[in-house]
Amino acid sequence: MAKGWTVQVTTHDRGFRGERIRQQLFEVAIEDKERAVEAVRHYLWARPDAHIEATAQLHGSLALSPGRVRCR
């Protein structure tokens, strides 16, 4: 069990039929907030012109090994 962050990522993609908005939740077992958000951005694939917003909430205990990322 490790301390970590739940990171919510909202991606805005401009496509052929208009804008598509996706929301994903990631659990990250890294104690530093900035490093946790960067790990999610590395884990997530998005188009180069996509607008990505990330918000994080602290979690006391995650069932992950330290340094791991899991998508919910």
Image (cartoon, helix red, strand yellow):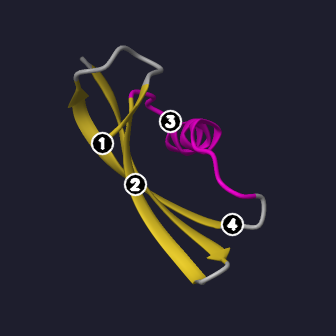
Location of residue 31 by image quarter: top left
Q: Which residue is mark 2?
A: 24
Q: Which residue is mark 1?
A: 72
> Contact, CB < 8 Å: mark 4 with mark 1?
no
> Contact, CB < 8 Å: mark 1 with mark 2?
yes
Q: Quadrant of the C terminus?
A: top left
Residue drawn at (63%, 46%) of the image: 45
Which mark, by number, is residue 50? 4
Amino acid under disc 3 = Asp
Q: Which residues are magenta?
A: 29-47
Q: Please name whichever residue, 2 or 40, is drawn nearer the observer in this view of the structure.
A: 40
Location of residue 29 by image quarter: top left
Tell me how far mark 2 sits from mark 3, CA to CA.
Answer: 20 Å
Provide the secondary structure element on which disc 1 rests. Answer: loop
- Left or right side of 38 for 33: left
Amino acid under disc 4 = Ala
Residue 32 lies in the magenta-colored region = yes
Amino acid under disc 2 = Gln
Q: Is residue 59 above or below residue 51?
A: above
Provide the secondary structure element on which disc 4 rests. Answer: loop
**Tag 4: Cα neighbours inside 10 Å, few (<14), some, or many (≥20)?**
some
**Tag 1: Cα neighbours inside 10 Å, few (<14), some, or many (≥20)?**
few
Q: Is tag 3's residue or tag 1's residue first in the polypeptide sequence?
A: 3
Residue 58 rendering spot, x and y as whole percentages: 32, 45
Q: Quadrant of the N terminus?
A: top left
Q: Is tag 1's residue or tag 2's residue first in the polypeptide sequence?
A: 2
Q: Is tag 2's residue or tag 4's residue first in the polypeptide sequence?
A: 2
Q: Is residue 52 above or below residue 69?
A: below
